[in-house]
Image: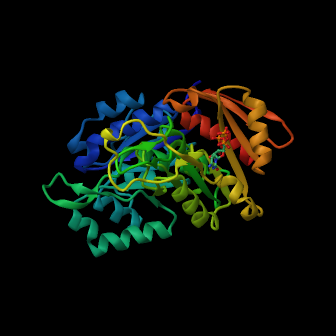
Amino acid sequence: MKKDFLEGKKVVLGVTGSIAIYKAPEIIRQLRDLGCDVHVVMSPGAQQFMTPLVFQTLSGHRVLLSPFEMGEEGIDHIEVSRGAQAFIIAPATANIIGKLAAGLADDILTASVLAHEGPVVVAPAMNVRMWKNAVVKRNVEELKAKGFTFVDPGSGYLACGEEGEGRLAHIDDIVLEILRAVASGPFKGKRILVTGGATREYLDPVRFLTNGSTGIMGVELAKASYALGADVTLITGPLHPRVPSQINVKEIVSAVEMLEAVRDELESADVLIMSAAVADFRPDIIEERKIKKDRGNFTLNLIRTEDILKSIQHLKKNRLFVGFSAETHDLFENSLKKLRDKGLDFIVANKIPESFGSGEVSGFLISPDGKKQEISASDKFHFAVHLLKKISA
Ligand code: CTP
């Protein structure tokens, strides 16, 4: 299935004179992969670092360089954002942040931002002392108060040789923020709690029982929830891909820890999506010392863990509870039974083994009356988006 989250959408990318500009082409590539039309505006500083040809080649459009040029459609800085769902400035220098806070329009980029009516996403990149400067902080706060969204820089090694906060945020996080800006989603103002990954049930300090969950579905559900407007907490087992900085993440190990974490977080959630592959059994004792092989053959005694969804049924109130069900056989019947036993609003039924891999996944969304809606095969992010849209409807 096509990646269609941004199909038919238009975004303007403004780039400025920071060394982090070398990462900006990746933003264009990711947006275009999602079906988005991207137009690029270069500040005068940006033009010192890179040539327009890079951006023109990647975006497929003429790059805007000067406020004193006219395109075929009319005045560039007025036309560029016409029909655009979002304006993104990445990397954003202290200079552009200051100019925007002051409302200046003395170059092509500032003029274009002023003429844009929709959301603006800003991803700063600068030296740590510049980022911590009180005037820069004030400008950032002023823009936030005016509705600009910031993807704050990360910490680490900076191009100037110093270490600290100021590196351009991870490109995936910038793109996620653009998705959220463009989608202006159905879960705006809602809090979604997602669980994902596999738990580990230790038998001694080095060995554990687990399952084949990669943790990918949990992370993609969290990203899709955020892209559709929600505030998101992800409770996940230890194995999982990188989680974007916008997601509040709690890592747990065992089924007992997952239950505790779900109970702690449920109070503030409007929706619970349990995609975690929680262990149903755990060893009755965890040996303090590593089990030595000269013990010979032995029997592992397993006891049932608590069913998390069942045990929190009484806390559901007006929250939406969504479960996942992976089955090798009788997918529909077994999934419907689980949905009813656990008192869920929906259950997502996937076939094993495809649900445990990193590739495409397909499935059904089943409701308590036995109605099933197909979610066609797609990568896990788009699968999560389609699923969430059906739930929100
Ligand atoms: N689940 C849970 N607590 C458990 C086990 C599972 O809350 N101890 C949740 C899962 O996160 C999922 C749903 O219940 O949302 C169904 O999980 P699944 O493993 O498919 O089924 P089980 O209920 O464990 O039943 P079985 O293993 O017998 O198929």
Name the residue rendered at 39%, 58% in the picture: 105
Seen from the viewer's position, the closer of residues 152 and 71 is 152
Seen from the viewer's position, the closer of residues 180 and 112 is 180
Residue 49: quadrant of the picture: top left
375 lies above or below 256: above
Q: Is residue 233 visible?
A: no
Count numbered badges in the picture: 0
Estimate the x, y position of residue 70 in percent, counting from the top left: 42, 38
Name the residue rendered at 21%, 67% in the picture: 129
Estimate the x, y position of residue 125 in percent, counting from the top left: 29, 55
Q: Is residue 75 visible?
A: yes
Q: Is residue 40 left or right of residue 227?
A: left
Residue most toward the right? 369
Seen from the viewer's position, the closer of residues 313 and 71 is 313
Colour mode?
rainbow
Q: Is residue 86 left or right of residue 193?
A: left
Residue most toward the left? 161
Estimate the x, y position of residue 126 in percent, counting from the top left: 25, 58
336 lies above or below 20: above
Which quadrant, please, contains the N terminus? Answer: top right
48 lies above or below 257: above
Q: Is residue 335 left or right of residue 161?
A: right
Estimate the x, y position of residue 303 in percent, counting from the top left: 58, 49
Task: Give the quarter the ligand 1 occupies.
Answer: top right
Seen from the viewer's position, the closer of residues 266 and 16 is 266
